[in-house]
Image: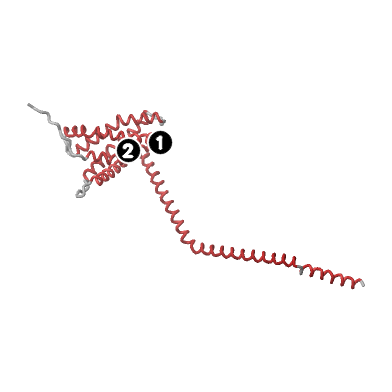
Amino acid sequence: MNGVFLRSGGRGAHGLLLGHLRSPRVCVEHSKLSSTRSRAYVRSHILFSKFKESSSGFSHGSPSLYSLSLSTATGAASFSWIRNGFISWYIGMIEARPVLTKSLTAGVVFTAADISSQIITLASSGGLDFIRTLRMAGYGLLVSGPSLHFWFNFVSRILPKRDVFTTFKKMVLGQVTYGPIITGVFFSMNAGLQGETGAEISARLKRDLIPTLLSGIMYWPICDFITFKFVPVRLQPLVSNSFSFLWTIYITYMASLEKAVVEKTATD
């Protein structure tokens, strides 16, 4: 009897469960759950497919991209090594042979500046005057380079500070002493090497020196301020020679002008 009761009870529970599952509300909820799982599967499948395509595209294009990145990085590293290596080498040469290094630097600057000056002012039918370029190179090598070395060392000894007021004093000192002297030496040496007489050299100085110095007042103070204020003493000639490139184009042009007319004194 108990077995019959249990079997009938089991059948009743099973019938209630089937009736509950077959009710409209449960069917709707079950369909919603199935639809949600289907959409989630579809989205996951689409995302996985896109990721796979992008990964495969990257794997196909990555060799060229990697090569470009590697070549760019290698080029930048090479340039940085060359630049840093040259600077280290140049500083070492300045410390080992300061006068020679600065003299050679000035010779290169004067050579390049004179060639540039000739190209700018060259007539269409004319050619480069290599004798003139040789004169300028010799001046830079033998006069400008050594004089800049001793001048900057001298100024740093008598005015060792690098504040703004001391920097202005160095600028004024250069404009009233070193500038006029070295410009006069430049004009006189260049004219003498061209065969001009003492009277002709004097006449050239009277004609060209003052205008050149006035032009220098408009150019050199800012260059001297940067040099004296921010550059170490051992590198000041190099920076000054860099600034002097444009200036040398101008003064080599001035030095190439025709001879000045010598005034003749009237005699009874």
Q: Residue furthest right?
A: 1
Between residue 225 and residue 98, name the one nearer to us: 225
Residues at circles 1 and 2 in contact by the CB criterion of under 8 Å: no
Q: Which residue is mark 2?
A: 99
- The CA distance from mark 1 to mark 2 is 22 Å
Residue 52 percent coordinates (x, y)? 56, 64
For residue 173, above or below residue 40: above
Instruction: Please report the residue visible at 22 percent of the width from the left and 36 percent of the height from the top.
Output: 189
Determine whether, in the image, residue 201 is placed left or right of residue 170. left
Residue that lies at the very extreme toward the front in this rendered image:
24
Compared to residue 51, the image places residue 261 above or below, namely: above
- Mark 1: which amino acid? Phe
**Amino acid identity at mark 2:** Val
Give the x, y percent position of residue 117: 26, 44
Q: Provide the residue designation for mark 1.
A: 230
In percent of width and height, residue 40 lies at: 64, 63
Q: Which quadrant holds residue 219? A: top left
Which numbered mark, 1 or 2, is in the foreground of this view?
1
- Identify the image quadrant of the N terminus: bottom right
Image-quadrant location for residue 203: top left
Q: Could you say which is closer to the camera, residue 20 or residue 136? A: 20
Q: Please tell me how crowded label 2 is: few (under 14), some (14-19), or many (20+) other residues with Cα within 10 Å.
A: some
Sequence order check: which comes first, mark 1 or mark 2?
2
**Picture quadrant of residue 238:** top left
Q: Which residue is depicted at the point 29% across and 33% down?
A: 179
